[in-house]
Amino acid sequence: MENESSETGQPGESGETGAAGGPGDSWRTLVAAQQPDWPDRREAAAATRWLTQAPPLVLAAECDRLRERMAAVARGEAVLLQGGDCAETFGEATSQGVRGKLRTLLQMAVVLTHATALPVVKVGRMAGQYAKPRSSPVESRDGLTLPSYRGDAVNGAAFTEEARTPDPWRMRRMYEASATTLNLVRALTTGGFADLRQVHDWNKGFVAGSAAGRRYERIADEIDRTLAFMQACGVGLGELTSAEFFVGHEGLLLDYEAALTRPEGETGRSYAASGHLLWIGERTRDLDGAHVEYFSRIANPIAVKLGPTASADDVLGLIDRLDPAREPGRLTLVVRAGADRVRDVLPTLVEKVTAEGARVCWVSDPMHGNTFTAPSGHKTRRFDAVLDEVRGFMEVHHALGTHPGGVHVELTGDDVTECVGGGNAVRTEDLAQRYETACDPRLNHDQSLDLAFLLAEMYRERPATLTPGSRP
């Protein structure tokens, strides 16, 4: 959902909305990019005061546990799977919507776990993904100019003055919707919904019904035989009825994040209590900006998106600011270079970071660099381009002998028609049928599973032409 944007805020423009001097307030004297212009500062202050008194959405111990899991990814001992909506909406924070995304991610994780023989760290792009950056602070239609839609956390999507006026009390609705989503996720992942046998049955159904299913039969059959073998040996499957699952979002709206920052009593460290893993977007990663300053002060595992213009100096500067102790699991670098650039951009970044001794997690975001506008006017992505960026990401890491840490994708559990291609191909003329995203196009359920099976093949089969230390 990160648009190509140069919009910036003013130093300290959000300073009236939170309690000065509290945890996570050092950013307030710096330029805060992509922040809403609240029309009533007193209401904004009241809304953020409410948030400072609200219970944390996640606990410090949970964030520390994810940091341990991400350290395993950094060491090459695990793989990250992160996915979910481009932009969540309050109206879609439903049981059906959450179940669909969770089911899709669980299905993908089973395939990747079997293919890599490594634990898969599962992080939903949910329970907080309600704010979005924009390329312009205003939008004009038919002579009428209104504030741009910045996500349900800020204003409404309808093109009316009432809907587009930023409302700081939407941050409270964001908190409440996130709490509802988290409660459901926790109930589902511990209440039998994540049972490995059930998830595998879902995958067998997908393979049977997919136009490309024959290609995936081998992996599905191997998983089937593994489960049968475990059962025949009397291995208990009871502990496989639940799943460890975390949530994350772009930490864009600093008034919200700062108000939900909580100190942890025993250690004195501060945590963003809005989600387990937060990331800085491509357009807010200014080394001297407010977002980098805020992120440098929280103890959560964090990530930064890197577009095709990111230089090695940029990345090393971010590491110095955000991970000065070079701790595995602290920092994830999410590369969104585009299918046509990833093989050129990524090698230098990986080599320079490796030479510095930083133990970061390298993750591919194959979505944001591959967007185009269809003749119908719909913003879309080609599945083949998404797949090619993942393949390029894998090739570079295989060539350099480094660990391709995983993927970060925008997806839904619904049968939407937002990206073209895939096994059960969506055509450009199909886009209007179920184009439902609030922002950027997402992979639908089948396309997400296509990606998982094809990524599994990449993890299992190193390119024959590549050897460690060579270049793709």
Image (cartoon, rainbow, N blue to C red):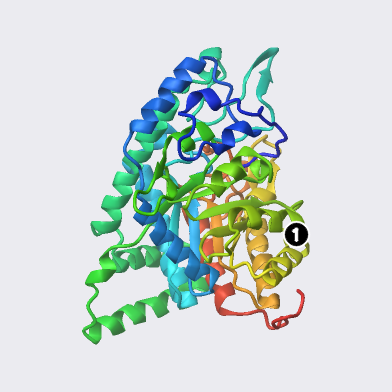
- Where is residue 307 drawn, in percent x and y? 70, 51
Q: Quick one: quadrant of the C terminus? A: bottom right
Indicate whether 82 appears above or below 472.
Answer: above
Left or right for 347, reference 285:
right
User: Would residue 338 be visible to someone looking at this image?
Assistant: no
Could you say where residue 320 lies in the image, as x and y percent from the top left? Answer: 65, 57
**How many circles with numbers are drawn on the protein?**
1
Q: Is 215 located above or below residue 292 in the figure?
A: below
In the figure, 196 relative to 6: above or below?
A: below
Q: Nearer the viewer, residue 23 or 469?
A: 23
Q: Quadrant of the N terminus?
A: top right
167 lies above or below 118: above
x 69%, y 66%: residue: 353
Horizontally, residue 135 falls left or right of residue 49, namely right
Which residue is the extreme one toward the bottom? 233
Residue indicated by mark 1 = 312
At 48% from the left and 36% from the top, the residue drawn is: 258
- The quarter of the displayed image where residue 238 is located: bottom left
Residue type at numbered disc 1: Ala
- Is residue 135 toward the left or the right of residue 200 in the image? right
Q: Nearer the viewer, residue 69 or 192?
A: 69
